[in-house]
Image: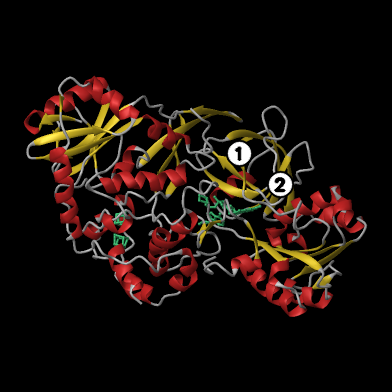
Amino acid sequence: MVNEVLIPHIGVITDIRKDTPDVKTFRVVGLDGKKVFEHMPGQCAMLSIPGVGEAMFSITSSPTNTEFMEFSIKKCGCLTSWLHAMTVGQQVTIRGPYGNGFPVTTDFKGKNMLFIAGGIGLAPLRSVINYIRDNRQDYGTIDIVYGSRSMDDLVDFREIEEEWKNEKDFNVYLTIDREQEGWNGHVGFVPSYVKEVNIPTDRTAVLCGPPIMIKFTLQALLELGFNKTQVYTTLEFRMKCGVGKCGRCNVGNKYICKDGPVFRMDQLQELPSEY
Amino acid sequence: MKKIAYQNIDKLYGELASNLDLYMPIKKAGALNFEKYENGKEADIETLQTVKSVKDLFFPQVEHFVDFKTDGTKIDVIDTREIRSEFAIFGVRACDLKSLEVLDKVFLQEPVDSMYKNKRDNAVIFTLACQNPHASCFCKVFDIDASSPKGDVECHLTNGVLYLNPITEKGANLVNKLTCLEDATSESVDLNKQEIKAKIDALPFSNLDLSVFKGENLMELFDRKEWEELSKACLGCGTCTFICPTCQCFDVRDFKTNNGVKRFRCWDSCMYSEFTKMAAENPRKNQMQRFRQRFMHKLVYYPSNNGGLYSCVGCGRCVKKCPQSLNIVKVIKKLGDK
Ligand SMILES: Cc1cc2nc3c(=O)[nH]c(=O)nc-3n(C[C@H](O)[C@H](O)[C@H](O)COP(=O)(O)OP(=O)(O)OC[C@H]3O[C@@H](n4cnc5c(N)ncnc54)[C@H](O)[C@@H]3O)c2cc1C
Ligand code: SF4
Ligand code: SF4
Ligand code: FES
């Protein structure tokens, strides 16, 4: 009998990092100590604790990382709370990779890129940003605008400060929603910050974050003169199978788990706005 | 072609069942459904339709496929998939047969669904032409020919005789083994096909117009204001999705036992409010949106992804069973005539 996609592999948690009060980043390898499978930036995997549940998460590590996969997970319900309670050495189940991922070897290649993230929306973008850092010659200038509720809610803050900011032709713009002691960076919402920074329109833009942020940031980009064909985003829907069969995650005739989660804004325009 | 007198039909069932597992319409507590045939069970191939469709035999309502045993930090994964050997299904109507083609495009597409494929590969399907199509049938609209359903063996029950015509090699191999059959010629069956065709042509829904339902009208159909009125009475009970031969949505759930965790999949329904619910929001907040999803999927989304094949086979089950008398025929009529 052929393999069943719904039957998962075992993953071992080898490291847990607390990023923010409600986000932890987990390192996962297979029983043999190696990566369980290869992926492309923007693809996802189903993680599960048997008896608790199974859910989809972006693989936040870059495929250029040959040792392990990482997942940044926000605590928001049953499974994610259990995951947050886990310790190094414990096992989970994992299956994937799922989804189309970002077009890093085609549409993005040779381009100046603009990455815009809100909150946990950085998770899929971190994968592509680190992929670009490891294939630097294939891409132009990289601008990153990242915002969160507060300074403590910025995911991967250390990596951003110590690595991304020192990368050649990388411009990193951080912002938080409200004034906070100890923060001397920008304060304000992502969409208005994007307009303030006035990024040149020769960039290919990628937007990830809560729907409301995506909506207003897209508007800001269009006002700056960006075209919808230059702007990519990822969609999020409840998922069960990850392979276009359980019927749960469609928008119009597209399944987000299979045809997405990455969509170009002009493609989304052709679909019902049911997301 | 082979035949057997209908009064001796139990011999055929008995002989088939002695060769392999036989599933067929069986009446239990007043409801007709596909079940395993055993001596003494009430088989019924005269009634036109089973309550649940044949999909239950390929994509069961509940299917347990993996166990997890946890020992300290360690998890063991135990494959519990059922592996079928050849089995026969008797009395499959043309609409249910066509529904398998619709399901194939979902489950056999890469990555292949191993559980569905295993059953599909091992089933020998005996169809049965519809002697008395019901007023709620509209298979003809989808170019389905209920007078000549091509399974592995095509059967006709006319004038007290059951005729069996093997279509595939698999069907012929099995039929040739059966000693209770006699050789037959095709005249009665040919005549019978004409009679059935005439009955179907005269059905009230046989001429529904599907011409607006195509991918290029996706946005326009989605935005039609008639959805409000069409869905107003919908209870979100999900009956229409469970009885539908082409509905394929499923959920994956875990069940804790004293001896580990069982993971199974089970039918789910896009008519339920929980179906798409997420932490922050629900993309389909009201019943109109969920109702629209079901019918847009059958008539527009699915065909646009599958070369124009509709994901409705006109079986009429939803027409008969919706407690609120809502159904796809009303949708086709309302949106189809603009
Ligand atoms: C393609 C994709 C990529 C994702 N990437 C990440 C990521 O990198 N990091 C991360 O933290 N989360 C990510 N998510 C969201 C993650 O899947 C949900 O947070 C998770 O399913 C919640 O599971 P739970 O058991 O903790 O919540 P539950 O206890 O199941 O539910 C809590 C609440 O969350 C809702 N919920 C269930 N499924 C989802 C879902 N898929 N999305 C949102 N809400 C849901 C429930 O309806 C309920 O209201 C992603 C989701 C998708 C579809
Ligand atoms: S259409 Fe009818 S059968 Fe289907 S969910 Fe609504 S009330 Fe139930
Ligand atoms: S939508 Fe209704 S008529 Fe069409 S296949 Fe499903 S149950 Fe039958
Ligand atoms: S998650 Fe099952 S169809 Fe997308």
Task: Give the crowd class for mark 1: few <14, some 14-19, many >=20 residues within 10 Å.
Answer: many
Q: Which of B264 and A235 is in front in this view?
A: A235
Q: Name above or below for residue A155 compared with residue B79.
A: below
Left or right of B218? Residue A31 is right
Residue A77 in the image, given as x and y percentages of width and height: 55, 53
Label ID, residue A237? none
Q: In which quarter of the image is the C terminus of chain B?
A: bottom left
Secondary structure under tag 2 reads loop
Measure the alpha-carbon separation of dots 2 and 1. 16 Å
Q: Quadrant of residue B181?
A: top left
Residue visible at 29% across and 40% down? B150
Closer to the chain start, of discs 2 and 1, is: 2
Residue visible at 61% across and 60% down? A235
Residue visible at 28% across and 49% down? B95
**Subunit of label 2:** A
Amino acid type at mark 2: Met
CB atoms at circles 2 and 1 under 8 Å apart? no
Whether marks 2 and 1 lie on the same chain: yes
Label ID, residue A40? 2
Q: Which residue in the protein does label 1 denote?
A: A94
Amino acid type at mark 1: Ile
Q: Can residue A33 be seen in this view?
A: yes
Q: Is mark 1 within 8 Å of ligand 1?
A: no
Q: Which of B285 and B54 is in front in this view?
A: B54
Left or right of A214? Residue B291 is left
Q: Which of A15 and B5 is in front in this view?
A: B5
**Subunit of label 1:** A
Residue B293 in the image, given as x and y percentages of width and height: 42, 63
Q: In which quarter of the image is the N terminus of chain B?
A: top left
Query: Which mark lies nearer to you, 2 or 1?
Result: 2
Q: Name above or below for residue B128 compared with residue B309.
A: above
